[in-house]
Amino acid sequence: MLPPTCGRSRIVSRGLDEHRHLLSDRARLAALQRAVLTVVRPGDVVVDLASGTGILGLMACRAGASRVYSIDDGGIIDVARALARANGCADRMTFVMGHSADVELPERADVLIADQIGYFGFEAGLLELYSDARRRLLNPCGRMMPERVHLMVGLVESEDVRDRIAFWSGQAAGFDLSPGTEIAANTAYPLTLSDSDLLSDGVNGAVIDVRSAGTAAFSVKADLTAFRSGALDAIGGWFVAELAAGVTMTNAPGAPDQITRQHLALPLGSPMTVRKGDPVTVSMQIRPAERLVRWTVDVRNGEHRLVRSTMNGMLLPREFLARTRPRFVPRLTERGKARQTVLDLCDGVRAVAEIERAAYERHPDLFASLDLAQTFVAEVVARDGA
């Protein structure tokens, strides 16, 4: 029995198509190939984190790696295995299903590689991956790609952002939507920006040294100057990654070597008029592990100031928040009890069919049929079994 997510993926799936987009990005592939050829030496052991199709591992083999451990927790790993066979690299590539934080390898790597930079340099999990893998999977003198990531900040005029927020001040089918306005104004939006959307040059707000950075909160600070007048709708975020010595990769709007990756837009909520030459100071506090960003915007030396946070844009129902309070006393739901049953029976002795039957018999109020129990067990085992 397939877990529910697998069953749905047979009808509608964006998974493979997402990788098609990544593999179609010539600027991205060219930068990554140059970086891998720079950082990987003949005979190296390489670990590719969140490896996807394994394209970086294939590049590492081309650079002379003796072994590549390709780690991914998604179904794409079987496509990666097939690509390794098709390209004559299967004898040097070992595919490990799972999240790298849960993986133990038989040897330490000479090189860690990954492309988990996201839109704004941090939110795709780069810091979490590397802070763990550096400690457990890499030789003390090992190398990493990327090495540093620069978080770039700019002023953005965007009718798209404006419309997304203004929508909630209107109606749908005659009903007032205004309670959604504040949430929309505190939401970070992935957006494709062009250089014509910018009201300022991009400024380097922070540098993440991937070779030493952890997952602790950090700050971003940028002093910007409007180079034209316009309506300031959002603060834009993008990155410049130092992949290896002399090799960079960027999604900067209008850059000649720009990769086809979106940017991050942090809205003001309502447009603010800026004039050419106006100073704008942007400060951010970022908690990478929680994907939380708090941004403060000061225009004309404090004449206008606003503070927003993605915490206020998260859809967190009061029932969920109540269960996270320190004094809350939790108890298992019926579904939680069934999950506990399945996990207790994953003892290295019982087969899945036996676990399915036990779950069905012990939780008749939850599973009206054996098929429903089979689907539930498949979900639990796929997630937490080995």
Image (cartoon, rainbow, N blue to C red):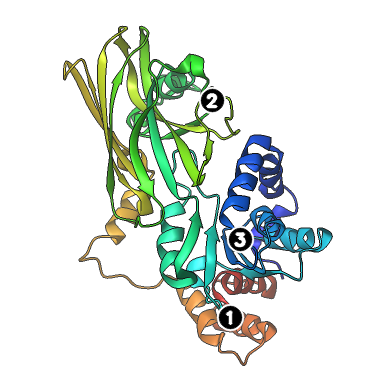
Q: Work out whether mark 3 precedes mark 2 in sequence or the reverse, and give the earlier one.
A: 3
Judge left or right: residue 77 versus residue 284. right
Q: Which residue is mark 1?
A: 359
Nearest the camera: 156 or 351?
156
Q: Quadrant of residue 152?
A: top left
Residue 241 numbered mark, or none: none
User: Is residue 5 something one can see in this rendering?
Assistant: yes
Secondary structure beneath dot 3 equals loop
Helix, strand or loop status at disc 1: helix
Q: Which quarter of the rendered picture does the C terminus lie within?
A: bottom right
Amino acid on which disc 3 is placed: Arg
Q: Position of residue 39 (x, y in %)?
A: 56, 55
Number of the label disc, if any, that sits on residue 41? 3
Numbered disc in front, either 1 or 2: 2
Residue picked out by circle 2: 255
Label 3, label 2: how many angstroms apart (C-alpha)?
30 Å
Please, is residue 297 above or below residue 218 in the view? above
Among the two numbered marks 3 and 1 on one chain, the one whose residue lies closer to the N terminus: 3
Q: Nearer the viewer, mark 3 or mark 1?
A: 3
Residue 229 vs 80, above or below: the answer is above
Q: Position of residue 70 (x, y in %)?
A: 63, 64
Q: Which residue occupies the foreground of this view, 198 or 184?
A: 198
What is the three-letter code of the residue carrying label 2?
A: Ala
Earlier sequence position, callout 1 versus callout 2:
2
Vertical arrangement, residue 306 with respect to residue 335, above or below: above
Binning the other alpha carbons within 10 Å of mark 1 as few (below 14), some (14 to 19) or many (20 upward) gives many
Q: Is residue 158 visible?
A: no
